[in-house]
Amino acid sequence: MTTQFHLAQVNIGRARAPLDSPVMQGFVDQLDAINALADRSPGFVWRLQTEEGDATSLQVFDDERIIVNMSVWESLASLRDYVYSGEHLQVLKDKKQWFEKMPGPTLALWWIPAGSTPTVGDARRALDLLGERGPTAAAFTFARPQPAPEALPA
């Protein structure tokens, strides 16, 4: 059985300093390895990136120090396995070294039809919805996951 929905995710962070500063060096140094780990992880489908191989140069918000990460996964379980294990878990634990605490949601998850690609507009909407309404079927978190929609009509 092929799934008709995939899980999209966005997470944002406000860097403590510009990426070329010494403060951010530890984050920048491991970016390629962590992205490559995602690319080869079970259940990985897609991630937002420029020709440089990451999305750090994309300015999605008015604040140029807000970094956006977006990806698509086959399931909630595959994304959770990537985020909360191995090398990525260590990066998550070190996040406070490089990123400031932000008001409002910094992570949103939502279901999309398999084969589609979310836009940065979709990501902003998901974060806004989560901030306004809390977890719903339209935007949710790991702590309050929502099931994938029922199968699309044939």
Image (cartoon, rainbow, N blue to C red):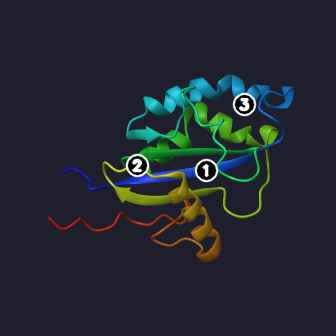
The answer to whether residue 42 is left or right of residue 23 is: left
Disc nearest the viewer among 2 and 3:
2
Instruction: Name the N-terminal-most of marks 3 and 1.
Output: 1
Residue at numbered disc 3: 27
Q: Amino acid at mark 3?
A: Phe
* Closer mark to the observer between disc 2 and disc 1: 2
Q: Amino acid at mark 2?
A: Thr
Instruction: Identify the residue at horizontal 84%, vertical 38% (top origin).
Output: 17
User: Percent position (x, y) of residue 73?
Assistant: 41, 46
* Residue occupied by mark 2: 117
Instruction: Name the residue tied to disc 1.
Output: 11
Considering the numbered disc 2 on the image, is that residue within a helix, a strand or a loop? loop
Marks 2 and 1 in Cβ contact (< 8 Å): no
Left or right of 15 in this view: 109: left
| Disc 2: CA contacts within 10 A as few (<14), some (14-19) or many (>=20) | some
Which SS class for mark 1? strand
Give the vertical position of 8 relative to 154 (above or below): above
Callout 1 amino acid: Asn
Q: Quadrant of residue 108?
A: bottom right
Q: Position of residue 119 (x, y in %)?
A: 49, 52
Q: Is residue 63 left or right of residue 80?
A: right
* 46 relative to 148, above or below: above
Q: Which of the two labelled residues, at mark 2 and mark 1, occupies the earlier sequence position?
A: 1
Front residue of 128/26: it is: 128
Question: What kind of element bears circle 3?
Answer: helix
From the viewer's side, name the closer residue of 98 and 70. 70
Q: Residue at x 61, y 55 (%)?
A: 107
Quick check: marks 3 and 1 in contact, CB under 8 Å? no
